[in-house]
Image: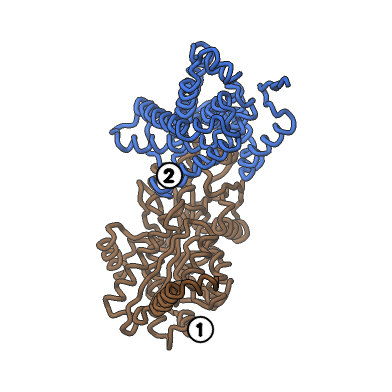
Chain colours: A brown, B blue
Amino acid sequence: MFGFMKKNVGKTLLVLSVGVLFSCFDSKKSDTIVIGNYGSMTGSEATFGLSTRDGILLAMEQLNAQGGINGKKVELKVYDNQGKPEEARLSVEKLINVDNVVAILGEVASTRSLAAAPVAQQYKVPMISPSSTNPEVTKKGDYIFRVCFIDPFQGSVMAKFAFNSLKLKKAVILRDSKSDYSVGLADYFIKTFTTELTGSIVADEKYQSGDVDFKAQLTSIKGKDFDFIFLPGYYTEVGLLARQARELGITKPILGGDGWDSPTLFEVGGDALNNTYISNHFSPDDPRPEVVAYVKTYKERFGVVPDGLSSAGYDAANVLFAAMKKAPSLKGEDLRNAIADTKNFPGVTGLLSLNENRDAVKSAVILKIENGKFNYLETVNP
Amino acid sequence: MNEFIQHTINGLSLGSIYALVALGYTMVFGVLQLINFAHGDIFMIGSFAGLYFLRFLSPSQPSVGVALLVVLVAMLCSGLLGMTIEKLGYRPMRKAPRINILITAIGISLFLEYGGQLLFGASPQFFPPIMEKTQFHFFGDITLDSNQVIIFFIACGLMAILQFLVFKTQFGRAMRAISHSLETASLIGINVNKIIRITFFIGSALAGAAGVLYGLAYPKIDPLMGLLPGLKAFVAAVLGGIGNITGAVIGAFILGLSETYVAGYISSTYRDALAFVILILVLLIKPAGILGTKKIEKV
């Protein structure tokens, strides 16, 4: 190598000086604040990532239009993790080390939040998950937050709704063994349904995300004496499952959680989804004035009615911006403390306060699916 | 008992789709002694071809006629694709060591998969319903979906046509001759290249049909969908005796049924693992497969 340098002094000097020149261009523009978003923009849960990103974008644009944070505009860096946990981890590493973000918004799926959270915690960059509901996510460290309820609450909401409102006592569970969210929510549902209430679990079957054929499990279930199916999965499999259940002649109601929330659900499931109910974070039919205004602005900006994911993204972004405004600086610890202090924040998904576990205490809504639409039924307060 | 019958119906439906793909594997192996790893991806391309053609047609009402048309178009597309792959990828390798052509097959498989992701997008897409769905109920509890019936009959129809083609026509005789010995066949005047090309066309066309039928049964399709069904169809072909057409069909139905029984009675977590356990067992116990015959090489 040194022989080369000696023989070509001129060329070497040129290369070295160009290198020095480029290093002078600092990628960090000091007049914008960079935040990161990682999500599944492709894959079976593509609508989750895309919706959340759109909600965050709307919040950011509104903020920048009003002057940003103390005069500085906010910039968003988005990475697609393709629905894979290893990629989620990598995305967060890139956001922190390459893009130097001050905070991260993401992820929707608990499995991916769990994969990425340790990285954010390690580098002391606050991470706010808009809609990961598995309780383990915020246990990864005090820099990890969420603006949604957690599954012990969600499970009990559906258990009580099934038992008390719909008067259904015998449940069949169908859970996605590859998803921490699904497994956890199923367990919490069972806990409330069998210990607090006097329901019974007739069968507990499993499938895996990515499966397309559920006839075997459904056939096993069909012969049993049950009142409803509890299906806490993600929309792609839920749609296929609902279809195949109806094809096999299972007409009982199916209950689920926020993982169903996607326009693609109806594309896949169609009419099979009639007579189903879910718990969710948000309903666009919420009459509160701030929600009505938000739904209108969102529709103008993106052309569709917002779903739970985009609304959670919107709230997560706004909680972050509010914290940024009141924090003494944007350094990790100051920002973290400001976020932790969020109390009675008027989000579009409800009034949120973060508790000592950095989880949001807020209400859930129950929606009924009829004719290709989510219809608002009731709100359940914590 | 009802549950068993229901599982059997589901298994036969699944098996018929595997059979169509397994036939392609076995036919190509028969004439070229090549395991065409790209075959599962031809199945995938057939599925997408069917989907895009269906969107192009956008029929106002679902009907069986539309379904058949979509299947035919998909068969044409994948048949042509198979022929192209043979011409560009495998024919130049005819005289090369076996491992070269094997690696080429893997390369083509990857090319189709990730090219598909670029072309169709990496997110899953969904087949709209093509046919009116009705359920038939037997003995109260057993349900037969009209989709399952149509898929089963289309698959069996195609297999019957293939059976006729291979055993009752000149072309079939030539194909069987080549699978016994390529050199001898060419010596007696068979146009080896042409027969191999047509074999590829037929095998790939069947895979394409399977792709559309799969899309009808399980509406979600994505560019990587060919991986697992392709592998399972390969196992089915090996189980039945690779190179043997009847064996491929038998192997596929055995696989489809056992997969459904395992998923229903034990746990669905093991359904994919079963195919590979079967593969290992076959290779350990009777590598020639159920209907396969040991080839004796006289030295």
Quadrant of the snapshot with the N terminus of chain A: bottom right
In the depicted structure, whether residue A9 falls above or below residue A41: below
**Which of the 4 quarters of the picture holds residue B275?**
top right
> Residue pushed farthest left?
A300
Q: Residue at x 38, y 37 (%)?
A: B51
In the image, taking residue A314 as reference, residue B286 lies left or right, namely right
**Which of the 4 quarters of the picture holds residue B56?**
top left
Q: Residue at x 52, y 59 (%)?
A: A160
Tag on residue B116?
Answer: 2
Element marked by disc 1: helix
Q: Quick one: B263 or B71, which is closer to the camera?
A: B71
Residue B277 percent coordinates (x, y): 68, 38
> Which amino acid type is marked by label 1?
Glu
Residue B108 percent coordinates (x, y): 49, 40
In the depicted structure, whether residue B280 falls above or below residue B33: below
Residue A212 percent coordinates (x, y): 51, 42
Tag on residue A321?
Answer: none
Residue A305 percent coordinates (x, y): 31, 58
Q: Which residue is mark 1?
A: A333
> Residue pushed farthest front?
A7
User: Badge 2 sits on which subunit?
Assistant: B
The Cα atoms of the two marked residues, 2 and 1, are separated by: 45 Å
> Which amino acid type is marked by label 2?
Gly
Q: Is residue A365 visible?
A: yes
User: Badge 1 sits on which subunit?
Assistant: A
- Which-is-in-front pick, marks 2 and 1? 2
Q: Quick one: A148 or A17, which is closer to the camera?
A: A17
Q: Residue at x 36, y 73 (%)?
A: A75
**Tags 2 and 1 touching, CB below 8 Å:** no
Q: Quick one: B168 or A360, which is closer to the camera?
A: B168
In the image, taking residue A200 as reference, residue B294 lies left or right, namely right
In the depicted structure, whether residue A3 falls above or below residue B290: below
